[in-house]
Image: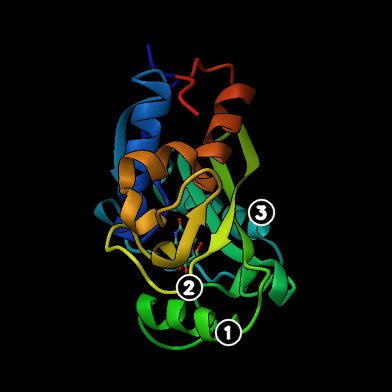
Amino acid sequence: MSLLSKLIIATGNFGKYKEFEQIINHTADNNFTHEIIFAPDKAKLIVEESGKSYAENAMLKARAWTEKTGLPCLSDDSGLEVEALNGAPGLYSARIIKGTDRDKAEWLLSELDGYENRKARFSAALCLCVPDEYTLVTEGYCYGTIAESQRGFDGFGYDPVFIPDGYTMTFAELGSEIKNNISHRANAFRKICRLLSVNVNIKA
Ligand code: IMP
């Protein structure tokens, strides 16, 4: 028996939607939701990310999609925080420079040129909004280091330059099965499951 009958993944990014689908299916089997829906298949909506934190932005997105669809919505807001750059690009990870994901990863490598400290973490805030019932926000992290060059082709964003702790390959080389078990989003989703007392598969 699932907790929810339908769940909208409140994102316009199909790559993120596929990650959530894998995270939800792997983490909670069929206990969480009966049906997972990509938001743009249901309605048209652009939400301005005007919050001052990942949590605020995640709430803005989930609430807007819930209002629009009347259905339970799960959103996230996330970013990469690099220690030597005082936490940059952080909240601005998606818009730090104009260009493709590979351009942004290249920007990061050039910013870190000459730095020995390559420690970084991915952060994600997830917001689950169930109309007329509750709004839940959790945060999850994934710690690692920034590689010397881009490696691998899986995933999106900074995946080709992020090596999670305990591995020697980047997220883009490791592939979705490993990433979606240990990622910031997966860790934040496990916290939602724990808060709602949904049984989870413990794989990480
Ligand atoms: P958002 O869509 O506003 O949450 O933007 C998050 C941005 O942070 C993305 O566009 C990526 O640049 C970066 N980011 C967040 N999570 C990940 C990830 O799992 N892999 C690679 N980059 C990520």
Residue drawn 48% across and 39% down? Answer: 182
Q: How is the image coloured?
A: rainbow
Q: How far apart are the two marked residues, 2 and 3, measured between alpha carbons? A: 31 Å
- Expressed as whole percent of the image width and height from the top left, the position of residue 113 reads 58, 84
Closer to the N terminus: mark 2 or mark 3? 3
Q: Disc 3 versus disc 1: distance between alpha carbons?
A: 31 Å
Per the image, the residue denoted by label 3 is 55
**Residue 3, disc:** none
> Which residue is disc 1 drawn over?
113
Q: Hey, which quadrant is residue 178 in on the image?
A: top left
Residue at figure coordinates x 40%, y 54% from the top left: 169
Question: What kind of residue is marked 2?
Answer: Glu
Q: Nearer the viewer, residue 170 or 35?
A: 170
Counting from the top left corner in percent of width and height, residue 120 is at 62, 61
Q: Amino acid at mark 1?
A: Asp
Numbered circle sitting on residue 148: 2
- Say whether marks 1 and 2 touch (CB < 8 Å): no
